[in-house]
Amino acid sequence: MNVAIAVSWWVLALVVVDFVSGLVHWAEDTFFDVSTPIVGPWIVAPNVLHHRDAAAFVKRGWFASNWDLTLAGVLIVLVAWACHALSGPVVLLAVVGAHANQIHKWCHAPASAPMLVKLLWKSGLLQRPAHHGGHHSGEKNTRYCVVTPFVNPVLDRLGFWRGLERVLVPLFGAPRREDLVKYRWYRP
């Protein structure tokens, strides 16, 4: 395999994990509330608190913030291994995905970030605190992806999240997105 193709697979792994982090973040902000069975108390309640107080989840330990994503990462590696598809990009996707919440936490507590994270911020490969801060300003309905600085600008410029809402909100409702009433197409 030539170098360009190999690098493309690594970049694709980062883009995929960042997109998935944004999709999950957007879905929990849009479709679930604290009374939703299972995900309400487990995922939504801490997220609601985090949006009210952006630093709230920094107080939670590593295990409390990352156990579920770590489990998903282990499952991805095991499935890839069982399917004889385990590769560097798959491991990168699993490891970065398992730490998406931690990457997010470091954006809220930059002083606690390890030197490697600070170097990745400086290199521009990892989302910086200022970039993520845009999600916590205004209506909190942009910059859902929490890993890189590359995916959010594209999705936000395309109106991806609003387009997804135009399709899915009429079907499923949106208990967490009161700001949707500002859009003419939305009829609660």
Image (spheres, helix red, strand yellow):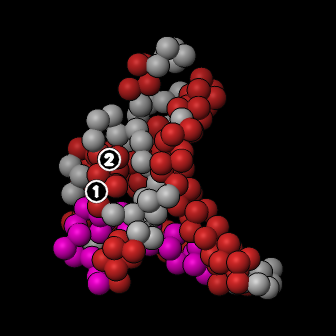
Q: Which of the pair 166/121 is nearer the observer? A: 121
Residue designated by label 2? 134
Instruction: Give the image location of residue 146, x and y in percent.
Output: 43, 59
Residue segment shown in magenta? 91-115
Disc 2 marks which amino acid? Gly
Instruction: Give the image location of residue 145, x and y in percent.
Output: 47, 54
Q: Which of the pair 130/58 is nearer the observer? A: 130
In terms of image quadrants, where is residue 130? bottom left
Q: Residue drawn 38% across and 26% down?
A: 179
Q: Residue drawn 45% across and 70% down?
A: 125
Disc 1 marks which amino acid? Ala
- Contact, mark 2 vs mark 1 (Cβ under 8 Å): yes
Which numbered disc covers residue 130?
A: 1
Q: Is residue 188 magenta?
A: no
In 3D space, how far apart are the residues under numbered discs 2 and 1 (Cα atoms)? Answer: 7 Å
Q: Is residue 166 above or below residue 67?
A: above
Q: Is residue 114 magenta?
A: yes
Q: Residue drawn 54% across and 35% down?
A: 159
Secondary structure that dominates the magenta span = helix
In terms of image quadrants, where is residue 42? bottom left
Q: What is the secondary structure assignment of the residue under circle 1? A: helix
Q: Is residue 28 above or below residue 7?
A: above
Q: Residue drawn 39% across and 74% down?
A: 123
For label 1, the crowd category at 10 Å Cα-Cα, with few meaning under 14, some 14 to 19 and many 20 or more, is few
Instruction: Give the image location of residue 186, x and y in percent.
Output: 52, 18
Q: What is the secondary structure assignment of the residue under circle 2? A: helix
Which numbered disc covers residue 150?
A: none
For label 2, the crowd category at 10 Å Cα-Cα, with few meaning under 14, some 14 to 19 and many 20 or more, is some
